[in-house]
Image (spheres, rainbow, N blue to C red):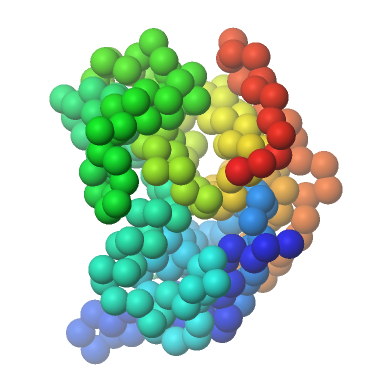
Amino acid sequence: MNCIVNLDSVTKTYRIGDIAVEALRGVSLRINQGEFVAIMGASGSGKSTLMNIIGCLDTPSSGQYTLLSREVGAMNRRDLARIRNRCIGFVFQNFNLIRRTTALENVELPVYYQRNRKKEHARERARMALEKVGLADRVHHVPNQLSGGQQQRVAIARALVNEPPLLLADEPTGALDSVTSIEIMALFQQLNRQGKTVILVTHEQDIAQYAGRLIRMLDGVVVADERIISPRVAEAAGAEAPIQTTGEN
Ligand SMILES: Nc1ncnc2c1ncn2[C@@H]1O[C@H](COP(=O)(O)OP(=O)(O)OP(=O)(O)O)[C@@H](O)[C@H]1O
Ligand SMILES: [Mg+2]
């Protein structure tokens, strides 16, 4: 199995004036390519801090983080930005779409931050990503003309457009009702079957059961890490027929 994320004794301490907050107090974790991992834990337990480090948005205070065999702690800001853009797609609780900007333009945006990529194909690639999330008929809608679930699909299309191997989602269903949440989980399961490694944070035990592995955090450490023997299978209501996959990336 190819290891994609490897954390070794990672700590993160935030300092505000004289006060130090130890958000991560020694996290060691290996995640293999093709896994679907859910992270749970009380508010303040360090989940988002961990996701920010895995996503190269922040670096550890101590310990080692290796992403796709590259030591992240040693990288400068430019290298961090590059590996982030190439290797990781982010999905957030509140979608983080740009208002008054169409779905297509929102999804195109990350292509323009990509070096050495053919920008002329941006539109076509954005369209394909939107198709993949079932929004081919909504490409010219702006966010406030879309439902919450559709907005999250746009955000997932945006996360996919540069074809990163790793998807990180911090509470992706936190702003959605339960039916829509399951549709979004169906989409993550589909992407995972197609080869994406998915790591998501959730407060809901029900949502975590769609993943294949559940990690629990408490006060900045991992307190449980177990395989989910038979994950729930999410079926997207009214969705297009499931795409046949070969298991290739
Ligand atoms: N930028 C920051 N500066 C200072 N302290 C921070 C910062 N970000 C997080 N913290 C602190 O680090 C700890 C972990 O925060 P984190 O956001 O990782 O928790 P979380 O598990 O994601 O919580 P939630 O479920 O509420 O999102 C908290 O005590 C928080 O106050
Ligand atoms: Mg958080």
Q: Quadrant of the C terminus?
A: top right
Where 16 sits versus 110, above or below? below
Residue at x 35%, y 77% (from the top left corner): 75
Residue at x 50%, y 25% (from the top left corner): 132
Q: Does the rendering let one see residue 73? A: yes
Q: Quadrant of the N terminus?
A: bottom right
**x then y, percent, for residue 15:** 28, 82
Where 60 sits versus 205, above or below? below
Where 219 sits versus 235, above or below? below
**x then y, percent, for residue 244:** 69, 24
Residue at x 42%, y 18% (from the top left corner): 135
Q: Does the rendering let one see residue 192? A: no
Q: Nearer the viewer, residue 77 or 124?
A: 124
Q: Nearer the viewer, residue 171 or 9?
A: 9
Q: Nearer the viewer, residue 146 or 54?
A: 54
| Side of 14 where 133 appears, left or right | right
Q: Residue furthest left?
A: 100
Q: Which quadrant of the view contains residue 143?
A: top left
Where 111 sits versus 130, above or below? below
Residue at x 33%, y 61% (from the top left corner): 82
**x then y, percent, for residue 64:** 50, 82
Count all numbered tags in the image, as a single digit: 0
